[in-house]
Amino acid sequence: MMNTAEYQVTYVSNPRAKSYILRVPDLRNVRVTVPRGGNRRRAEEFLESRRHWVERQREVIRRCVVDKPLSWSVGSVVWFRGHREIIEADADGGIRVGDLKLKPGQIREDLQAAVQGQMWRTAWVELPALVKRQAGLMGLNPTRISIRNQRTRWGSCSSKRTISLNWRLIQTPEEVSRYVVIHELCHMFEQNHSVRFWSAVGRYCPDYRSQEGWLKRYGRELFHESHRR
């Protein structure tokens, strides 16, 4: 573990890693994964060669923290169905975010909790239906579908064929949530990320790289705004 003037660097050995990996989870920490056969000196050289990348990632996080309000209110802009939507007040005292509507009785003082709660309920209705439709097209039959509040993952598929999805997928474009569903269903074919796995993903979602790109570009923002409370 090494400290710099602005953040702390942690080195973690992972014998399954094939290369050195950098992660910037927040402004105060940088994580370097050291692969099998690697060493501390080469890890430090790897970090030094990518200082500019680290600073760019920290600037993205800094903008999220500084430029955005710490709570949601009427006029706040939030992600929903792949668009940045304005939280608007209805004439009847309710709240509207895109096609999402909260009646006055559903609204508490904390608008973030109220709006996200309604998004979660919407996700519980729409995402399992999406899984069932897509599974039918792929000839698959998951044993269980759950909607969860994962901190860093968009979905998972267990060895018992349980598909778990992050409720925040309701905030992403439809084609992105469909890709995540296909990705997890393909783990029912291959419980790994082998060439055969990605071949299956590509068969059912030919433009999956584009959807992964969206998640990489905006995913941090979605996870960050969910945990500002």
Image (cartoon, rainbow, N blue to C red):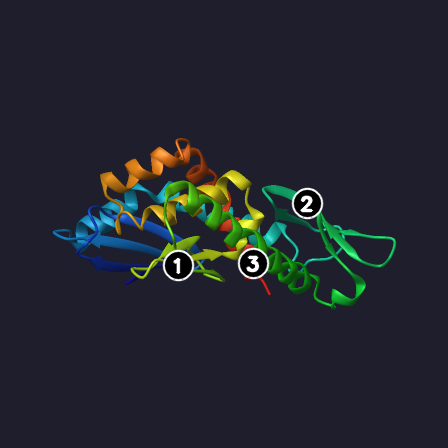
Residue 46, by quadrant, is: top left
Nearer-N-terminus badge (1/2): 1
Residue 104's disc number: none
Question: Which of the two residues, 155 or 108, is positioned nearer the viewer here?
Answer: 155
Secondary element under disc 1, as helix, strand or loop, is strand
- Provide residue 203's location: percent of width, then percent of height: 34, 33
Residue underneath mark 1: 29
**Is the C terminus in the top left, top right, bottom left or bottom right quadrant?**
bottom right
Residue at x 19% of width, y 47% of height: 18
User: Badge 2: few (under 14), some or many (20 or more) residues near its Cα, within 10 Å?
Assistant: some
- Provide residue 224's location: percent of width, then percent of height: 53, 55
Residue underneath mark 2: 85
Alpha carbon separation for disc pair 2 and 3 = 21 Å
Residue underneath mark 3: 124
Residue type, mark 3 in image: Trp
Residue type, mark 1 in image: Asn
167 sits to left or right of 85: left
